[in-house]
């Protein structure tokens, strides 16, 4: 076995498909028209955003309903710094947004992550709502009329500006969550926090690190998104629906799996575009997302990705059989962290 | 000075309604072990039921309250077995999945209502009581008084149920320890459904009154979820006395911010206070709740 084999997982067959996949996504602007390139740009962005949510939701076991706050911070940072006055270049603004998002995550996570998961869920949500209010009311953000950015019309520029950070995100997540001690620590916290603590893991620290990591990603993508759509206002970059999308994409794809969010994002983004193409911009989509989320929790808790493994398919059919048998009550217990 | 007293009174009166919502929410949390993200949607749906009562049936919303209660209690009764099933399932992380489930239900409710009625704000037109009651130099809107009276009665009845009936005893037992309650012969599933149904009905009724005092839009659900959660965290999760104090405090805080700062910053201030409380005293102001 040579070194490359050790670094890339899977069989030769899987390695080959991975290579083909990489070539395909790296050449999208060359074989797709502008419409489809834009769609793939969206897929890349949402995959990374859903992955960022998956770090907390899937790997750390804490639900964040305020991920959009970090996205909005990134978007507003880029937008404000690229205005006439400061006049920064686009790429220089991205690290600023990332750092701001990360620092904020540490500040929020420090008091809240010590508590039950529900506190974290609501605190992040309240944070996002508060940001939405502030951005709408404050003067420097342009209020509800928003900010306009310099225009850059190149479709392929944005495709690669989304794709490269998205790929970096996935590689980083894979290395950190699946191939490092940090990954083991965070999963130990998720699976049994008290046990993790007892074997010497500083659980608070690990959780805060994970949260900061998961905040930096939307911080960067918010910035790119702002430049992409050239006009931002509170409802386009701070609305709760953006978090909902991330949550649903990660859950539909598969919680706590590295490819889950990408799969969920691809499927749902295509559905979303199709929905808009057929019915126009409609709030019915929010209802669809909500219903889908509930159904997935009820019937496919491990997400679409679980359909790909034979063992899971078997387990799923077994579960269906068990559901038909009488109710197994009395298994209540008080376990769980929430 | 009059403005200040006026604001305080107005705030405390609305605070009563927050108490009603939060006590049910807190108990549902204890019994089902799930933070119900749909709580604000029950408020919103209740308010729209109030709107429907005048526009569709031509009945005053106050007379319509029992219908609202029965309807939403029934909805809650139907929904709670699903929450219970997710919470007690053999999933890897049932608590997290249950949270996601109620969030999905909340999003479904919000999306459906947005599609049905759009973004326009509506007000529940409560015709029976209008005008103001004047005490000295204070002008108190009659509707707020009615809201407070309703909240006081509903909360008192709920407490009577909890502390003076055998079913209430069972509900408190389940909230403390499901396994032992089950061993003592309590039907955990049925008690959970009952509590959830009561809570949904109560919250929707409070929603009718809130919709009369403030105007409401189909997207306001999350706001009320946040406020209910604020009360419960401030009071300490699972503490009824704490919810009582915190609910009134929230009403006060909201009124003061609206009058002296700006309604635009209500959530920001509320969040700031919530954050501080969590830092200083995670078990609530009275230090009685569960961290």
Image (cartoon, coloured by chain):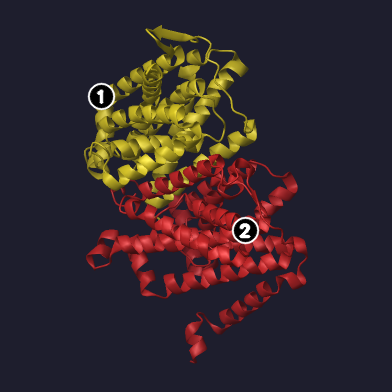
SS of the residue under disc 2: loop
Image mark 1: chain: B
Measured from the top left, where is residue A226 in percent x and y?
62, 56
| A238 or A315, nearer to the observer | A238
The answer to whether residue B120 of the structure is visible from this angle is yes
In the rendered structure, the answer to whether residue B200 lies left or right of residue A228 reads: left
Measured from the top left, where is residue A149 in percent x and y?
66, 55
In the rendered structure, the answer to whether residue A289 lies left or right of residue A52 reads: right
In the image, farthest residue toward the bottom: A2
In the image, farthest residue toward the front: A85
Measured from the top left, where is residue A165 in percent x and y?
57, 68
- Is B71 located above or below residue A158 in the figure? above
In the rendered structure, the answer to whether residue B66 lies left or right of residue B283 reads: right
Q: Which label is found at residue A82?
A: 2
| Residue that appears at 54% across and 72% down | A168
| A146 or A204, nearer to the observer | A146
Q: Nearer the viewer, mark 2 or mark 1?
A: 2
| A83 or B42, nearer to the observer | A83
Image mark 2: chain: A
Instruction: Give the chain coloured red.
Output: A
Dot 2 and dot 1 within a common chain: no
Q: Are marks 2 and 1 in contact (CB under 8 Å)?
A: no
Instruction: Give the chain coloured yellow.
Output: B
Distance between mark 2 and mark 1 Cα atoms: 65 Å
Measured from the top left, where is residue B94 in percent x and y?
38, 52
SS of the residue under disc 1: loop
Give the residue number, with chain letter if any, for mark 1.
B165
| Residue that appears at 69% across and 58% down | A150
| Residue that appears at 51% across and 20% down | B212
């Amino acid at each position: 076995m040579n070194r490359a084999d050790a670094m890339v997982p899977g069989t030769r067959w899987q390695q080959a498909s991975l290579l083909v996949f990489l070539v395909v996504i790296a050449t999208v602007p060359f074989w797709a028209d502008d419409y489809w390139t834009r769609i793939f740009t969206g897929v890349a962005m949402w995959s990374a955003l859903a992955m960022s949510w998956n770090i907390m939701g899937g790997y750390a076991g804490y639900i964040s309903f305020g991920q959009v706050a970090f996205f909005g911070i990134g978007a507003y940072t880029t937008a404000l710094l690229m205005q006439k006055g400061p006049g920064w270049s686009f790429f220089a603004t991205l690290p600023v947004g990332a750092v701001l998002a990360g620092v904020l995550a540490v500040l929020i996570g420090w008091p809240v992550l010590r508590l039950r998961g529900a506190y974290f869920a609501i605190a992040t949500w309240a944070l996002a709502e508060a940001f939405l209010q502030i951005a709408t009311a404050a003067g420097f953000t342009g209020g509800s009329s928003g900010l306009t950015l310099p225009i850059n019309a190149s479709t392929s520029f944005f495709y690669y500006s989304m794709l490269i950070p998205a790929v970096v995100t996935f590689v980083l997540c894979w290395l950190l969550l699946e191939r490092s001690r940090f990954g083991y620590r965070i999963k130990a916290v998720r699976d049994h926090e008290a046990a993790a603590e007892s074997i010497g893991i500083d659980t608070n620290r690990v959780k805060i690190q994970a949260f900061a990591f998961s905040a930096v990603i939307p911080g960067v993508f918010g910035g790119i998104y702002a430049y992409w759509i050239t006009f931002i206002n509170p409802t386009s970059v701070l609305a709760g629906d953006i978090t909902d999308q991330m949550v649903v994409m990660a859950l539909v794809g598969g919680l706590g799996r590295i490819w889950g969010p990408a799969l969920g994002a691809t499927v749902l983004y295509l559905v979303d575009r199709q929905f808009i193409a057929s019915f126009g911009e409609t709030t019915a989509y929010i209802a669809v997302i909500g219903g889908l989320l509930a159904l997935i929790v009820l019937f496919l808790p491990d997400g679409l990705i679980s359909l790909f493994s034979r063992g899971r398919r078997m387990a799923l059919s077994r579960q269906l059989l068990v559901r038909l048998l009488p109710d197994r009550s009395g298994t209540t217990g008080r376990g769980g962290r929430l | 000075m009059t403005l200040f007293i006026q604001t305080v009174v107005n705030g405390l009166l609305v605070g009563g309604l927050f108490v009603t919502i939060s006590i049910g929410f807190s108990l549902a949390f204890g019994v089902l072990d799930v933070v119900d993200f749909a709580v604000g949607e029950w408020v919103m749906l209740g308010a729209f039921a109030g709107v429907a009562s005048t526009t569709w049936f031509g009945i005053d919303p106050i007379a319509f309250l029992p219908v609202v209660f029965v309807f939403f209690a029934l909805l809650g009764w139907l929904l709670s077995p699903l929450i219970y099933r997710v919470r007690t399932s053999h999933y890897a992380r049932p608590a997290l999945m249950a949270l996601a489930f109620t969030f999905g239900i909340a999003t479904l409710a919000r999306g459906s209502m947005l599609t049905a009625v759009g973004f326009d704000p509506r007000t529940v037109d409560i015709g029976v009581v209008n005008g103001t009651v004047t005490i000295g130099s204070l002008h108190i809107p009659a509707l707020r008084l009615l809201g407070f009276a309703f909240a006081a009665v509903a909360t008192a009845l709920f407490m009577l149920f909890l502390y003076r009936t055998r079913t209430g005893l069972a509900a408190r037992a389940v909230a403390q320890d499901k396994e032992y309650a089950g061993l003592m012969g309590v039907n955990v599933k049925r008690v959970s459904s009952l509590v959830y149904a009561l809570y949904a009905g109560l919250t929707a009724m409070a929603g009718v009154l809130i919709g009369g005092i403030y105007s409401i839009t189909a997207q306001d659900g999350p706001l009320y979820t946040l406020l209910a959660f604020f009360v419960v965290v401030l009071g300490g999760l699972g503490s009824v006395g704490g919810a009582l104090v915190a609910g009134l405090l929230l009403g006060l805080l909201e009124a003061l911010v609206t009058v002296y700062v700006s309604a635009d910053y209500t959530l920001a201030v509320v969040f700031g206070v919530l954050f501080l409380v969590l830092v200083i005293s995670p078990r609530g102001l009275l230090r009685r709740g569960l961290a």
